[in-house]
Image: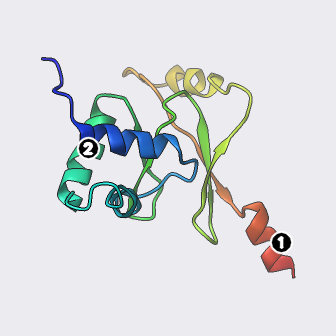
Amino acid sequence: MALKYSRQREVIKDFLCTRKDHPTADIVYMNVRQEYPNISLGTVYRNLTLLSEIGEIRRLRVGDGVDHFDADTSPHHHFICSHCGRIIDLKMENIDYIQETAEKDFNGRIDSYSAYFFGLCENCCNLLQS
């Protein structure tokens, strides 16, 4: 079944493509409302869910109880600051060996993995050292 075009869905996706900070649905809603004042929070949630289910965006669950969204669907990993909660894309060498290691003593099938790294971002390190 082909997905029917939605201008609101396109605006949501376009907005995410301009961001590197992995916004929440509320942040997406507040920003998209500037162009579409009548859009509902429910519409934003439904479209974010749909876009993540069809693989056009990524939904990140980083342990803070709120979903974050990422327009970059390429394989990459994230750093989460334990102090301010900032989520940063990590540029790093391929670590696919981790999946191979996990598969060695596992009788099921591992299709993918995601790695989150936690600590203090540069800004929080500088702030806490002051």
Q: Which residue is mark 1?
A: 126
Label 2 amino acid? Gln
Residue 87 is marked as: none
In this view, 68 is above or below 130: above
Place of residue 43 in the rendered image (x, y in percent of width and height, measured from the top left)? 19, 52
Q: Quadrant of residue 32?
A: bottom left
In the image, 41: left or right of 110? Answer: left
Element type where label 1 sits in the image: helix
Check disc 2 and report the residue beneath it. 8
Q: Residue 79: percent from the left, percent from the top?
A: 64, 51
Query: Residue, x 60% and y 39% (percent of image)?
Result: 77
Q: Is residue 89 above or below residue 110?
A: below
Q: Residues within 10 Å of mark 1 (few under 14, many from 20)?
A: few
Could you give the CA–CA distance between mark 2 and mark 1, rounded to whole angstroms?
40 Å
Q: From this view, report whether residue 108 is shown above or below residue 76.
A: above
Q: Quadrant of the N terminus?
A: top left
* Amino acid type of the residue tagged 1 in the rendering: Asn
Of 99 and 67, nearer the camera is 67
Mark 2 or 1, nearer chain start = 2
- Find the residue positioned furthest to the bottom: 130
Left or right for 97, reference 66: right
Residue at the spot 45% in from the left edge and 60% down from the top edge: 63
The picture places residue 18, in percent across and down from the top left corner, at 53, 44
Q: Is residue 70 visible?
A: no
Q: Tell me if label 2 and label 1 are in contact, CB under 8 Å.
A: no
Q: Say which of marks 2 and 1 sits in front.
A: 2
Outermost residue, left side: 1
Name the residue located 26 percent from the left edge and 62 percent from the top edge: 37
| Quadrant hosting residue 9 | top left
Callout 2: 10 Å neighbours few (<14), some, many (20+)?
A: some
Numbered label tally: 2
- Residue 73 versus residue 36: which sits nearer the camera? 36
